[in-house]
Image: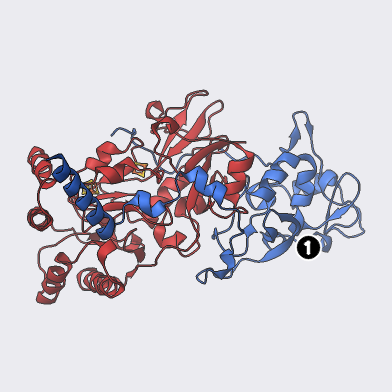
Amino acid sequence: MKILAYGSGLFFLLLGAALLTCPAVMAGQGSVLERIHGAEEPFDSMEIESVQQLTLKTVAAKESYQGGEFRVLARKEFISRFRCSVCHTEKPMLAQDGVLFTHSDIRINHGRAGDALICIECHHEKERDFLVDSQGRKIDFDHSYQLCGKCHFRQKRDWIGGAHGKRETYWAGERVVRNCTSCHNPHSPAFAKKMPETYSLPLDE
Amino acid sequence: MDNRNKEEGQIKKDDPIKRKSTRRSFMKGLSLAAAAGSAGLVTGGCGDSATAEEMGLKWEEYFKTNYRLMTQEEKDETVARLEKLAKLRYDLDVKVSTQEPLERVLYGYAFNISRCKGYMDCVEACVKENNLDRKSKTQYIRLFEMEPGQLDPTSGEGKYFHEVPVDNKFYMGVQCFHCENAPCIKACPTKATWQEPDGIVVVDYDWCIGCRYCLAACPYWGRRFNWGEPEVPREEITKKQHYLGNRMRMKGVMEKCTFCIQRTRDGKLPACAEACPTGSRVFGNLLDPDSEIRFVLENKKVFRFKEELGTDPKFWYFMD
Ligand code: SF4
Ligand code: SF4
């Protein structure tokens, strides 16, 4: 009786395995963490054919991540009044005039409370089409992460690795991530409050 | 519903042939009960006035096997039928893919609870991408406003009708965690739900008998049941579909997050990860040591929800 029960159990086990390989068998290599630790070989996601070139303009980052080179979304194209030097010529310009006219939409809410940043802390005073860091080094708008990272170095480290910021469209293929200023308004970098898109029911409903 | 459960209890003991016929008579009852979809809405099941061609296609559909037992030829045939049915019924040119898993890929997800602002763009994007029933407001993702220190989303507030983020609150999203050791799969009496080699837990909607055992077994509220005929406005249908993903479901079947299988197997991010404006959602290949998801797991404080259950979810929460 016992043998019979055992035998039929085994039979169904084999049948089950043959017909529909059970997930534990298919996964095969134990827990997720074990599988992760066992995967040290680099993975070439470039061979995934369905990944297409983005239509957005990107530039090669002047940094590298754990997987090598990567690209960032370009910025200059999205700055509506770029190039700045078209207006900002040799002729002196009063900050007040700028606030009143062309840049009236800009509110500086960046920096420590009571000690907000001023324009020329980030914008190059002479070479108007560039940003500038505290050592006076010129920084291209397309590589604004180089400037942001000077203060926000922890965020920059996470951004390079992938724990901060966003990849664009694809998880596979050549790595393209958003620039800091693709998401954050540099003049007021905190995300704005807004109404939620929808609502959720309680979990047990 | 009680009858159904009773019937289900017997099914387990039946032989496979009997089981099939039970499933069929059950499904037949369902389609008879299915109400006709109103104008402009696309529903998954039968309507009223079907042509002979449509009936023929449905008849053939009815006798197909479990997706996992299909040859590629059979998969191509069922896809062709489903596409034809969508054309006949709704004049929609849907494309149903049977794209296989990519090799050496195991999908994983990480959610940054210190960065999510509770905007719910992810929830909306998911509903649209996956053709979720608008009538019953089905959502794969639920998002909760939480008190600091609180880590149980069952007591979180999902209906917050105010501007977010609120100071001193945090936001936590919950969806199917694609458990490596998934209790939902073990609970299914018809093997209608399983884990694919790339780690995605899927449902064969045509093989599901709607017993809801899996829903009861899931400790994370990851599954959604179609009590009624799902309805989606015709112009909002996502036409790029996958057999195991966002193709139209019918009344009486289970569905759930598939990590947007129709997108991710093409190398794209899931709709939620793409829609999130804050970058709180990280998705990628756990078997790629250079991936973002691996960076998060190796460099951030991560935890999994109810880890002690041994379900081994492939979804981590993390903090900056
Ligand atoms: S979260 Fe629930 S539905 Fe998803 S795999 Fe785990 S047990 Fe199954
Ligand atoms: S998938 Fe869930 S509802 Fe469908 S047959 Fe399996 S256990 Fe029942």
Identified by mark 1, the residue type is: Arg
Q: Is residue A118 visible?
A: yes
The residue that appears at 16% across and 43% down in the rendered structure is A3
**Chain letter corresponding to the colour red:** B
Q: On the picture, is B28 further left or further right than B174?
A: left
Per the image, label 1 sits on a secondary structure element best described as loop
> Which residue occupies the foreground of this view, B287 or B264?
B287
**Percent position (x, y) of residue B282?**
54, 48
- The chain identifier of the residue carrying mark 1 reads A
**Percent position (x, y) of residue B49?**
10, 67
The residue that appears at 36% across and 36% down in the rendered structure is B220
Q: Quadrant of residue A87?
A: bottom right
**Percent position (x, y) of residue A96?**
82, 44
**Percent position (x, y) of residue B6?**
8, 39
Q: Is residue A73 visible?
A: no
Label 1 CA crowd tier, 10 Å (few <14, some 14–19, many 20+): some
Tell me what hue chain A is rendered in. Answer: blue
User: Quadrant location of the C terminus of chain A?
Assistant: top left
Q: Quadrant of residue B245?
A: bottom left
Q: Quadrant location of ligand 1?
A: top left
Q: Please give the residue where the numbered disc 1 appears in the rendered image.
A: A83
Q: On the picture, is B26 further left or further right than A47?
A: left
B135 shown above or below A204: below
